Amino acid sequence: MKNENLKIFELLSPKYERDNIKLGLSRIKKALQELGNPCMNIPAIQIIGTNGKGSIAAYLESILFEAKKKFGVTTSPHLFDICERIRVNKKNINKTDFEKIYTSIEKIFSKYELTPFEKIFCCALNFFDIEKVELLILEAGLGGRLDATTAHKLRPIIAIGNIGLDHEEFLGDTIEKIAQEKLAVIEKNSIVISCNQNSKVKDLIKKKVEEVGAELIWKDSTSKSYELGLKGIFQKQNASVAVGAIEALNKMGFNIKEKYISEGLKKTTWNGRLELIDYSNKKILVDCAHNYPAAKALSIERSNWENEEEGIYWILGVQKQKDINAILKTLLRRSDHLLLVPVPNQPSWQLKDISLIKEISFQNIIEFEKFEFAIEYLFNLKKWPPNHPVLTGSIFLVAEFIKFVNKQEN
């Protein structure tokens, strides 16, 4: 790429992005105003929650693509390439277009001291404006009340994934505080679609909807008549929220037929979510269970695996700011083996840090300097484990593992 600033931006490490989080709407609102408020009159489905946001976005994308609608999607974080975060009709923005947009507005980025997330959001809205989309899908980053996606005024549909404990250092140390930060995006006359929630969260959603005068629709798991492209019991809830959002769109006149909903759900793909990866004629399951609610969902999923009582080999890498106690207690069972690895290029939990957890047996835990060594260890076992080994704990670990596999195979 010609532009050095975008090259640096593209290569920003996740840690850099995280270290530069500054929640607040004043900067982004001023920047968007100076840019002429791109997409100002384009309605958006805003997706909030702790887990499942990316899956809900993927289901919506797939359905809208089948229905031949023109739509823009912005999600975070990316798995392999920053261009994944800005998509039109399931196609990533190309680097040339990204560079052109970035270069044309970078002075505004500096003027208002925008964070990396805000910069991407500005580029996304500019691109969607140029592409003349008819609908936006905006996945919130952290929280909601002060999230950049909330700066887009026209958000008639709010889709809510599972709300649980995560990012406590930014959003508050209780589920009530976290939920309130996220639910602040609900406004008068918006249609709110939510999956089943913790009873406290459920009450807060009802209260907020009543306060502002919004419409609330609860969605249970999708019916058995739908075939889902994404694996996992918990995906039925995510899919049902996506279907609810499509039904809300139909109330607004989008006319998306049932056949497109069914076909879209079936064709949905989303890398790194309960995905079986082939490596040297063996299969390793990867999943981005980066926090307690995601670990809980993975643990429930595990209960349905054949021979799960014989134990699972977990290749686990967890970022230092995450609650590893809760993750380990949720995932590990007596017959399991834990291969502890660092998350590449991230401050990560080490064995010396977690050895004080009383409830965990440390007889079956081995620490490795790199995830590659843990993979090598598995291949040196006398017999491959009866259940697929699971690599999890961080989206960044999953991304690096998939890149590693692709490099080895090519």
Image (cartoon, rainbow, N blue to C red):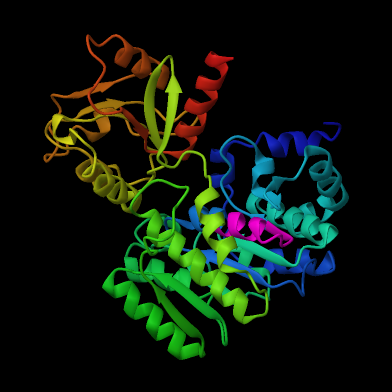
Where residue 36 sits, quadrant-wise, is bottom right
Relative to 225, is 113 on the left or the right? right
Membership of 66 in magenta stretch: yes
Say above or below: 203 vs 219: below
Residue name at image x 57 percent, y 50 percent: 76
On the rendered structure, is 93 left or right of 23?
right
Is 345 situated left or right of 96 in this image? left
Q: Position of residue 29 (x, y in %)?
A: 72, 69
- What is the number of callouts on the image? 0
Quick one: 19 or 328, which is closer to the camera?
A: 328
Viewer-proximal residue among 104 and 398: 398
The quadrant the N terminus occupies is: top right
- Between residue 389 and residue 262, name the one nearer to us: 262
Identify the residue at image location x=59%, y=61%: 260
Which residue is painted at 32% across and 54% down in the image?
Answer: 293
Residue 370 visible to an observer of this rendering: no
Residue 348 image offset from top left, x and y in percent: 39, 33
How far from the left and from the top, in percent, is residue 64? 64, 60
Give percent across and percent down for residue 65: 66, 56
Picture layout, residue 195 above or below residue 400: below
Q: Quadrant of the C terminus?
A: top right
Give the left or right position of residue 356, taking residue 390 as reference: left
Viewer can see residue 298: yes
Residue 124 vs 404, above or below: the answer is below
Give, as a single range, the part of the protein colored magenta.
Answer: 59-72
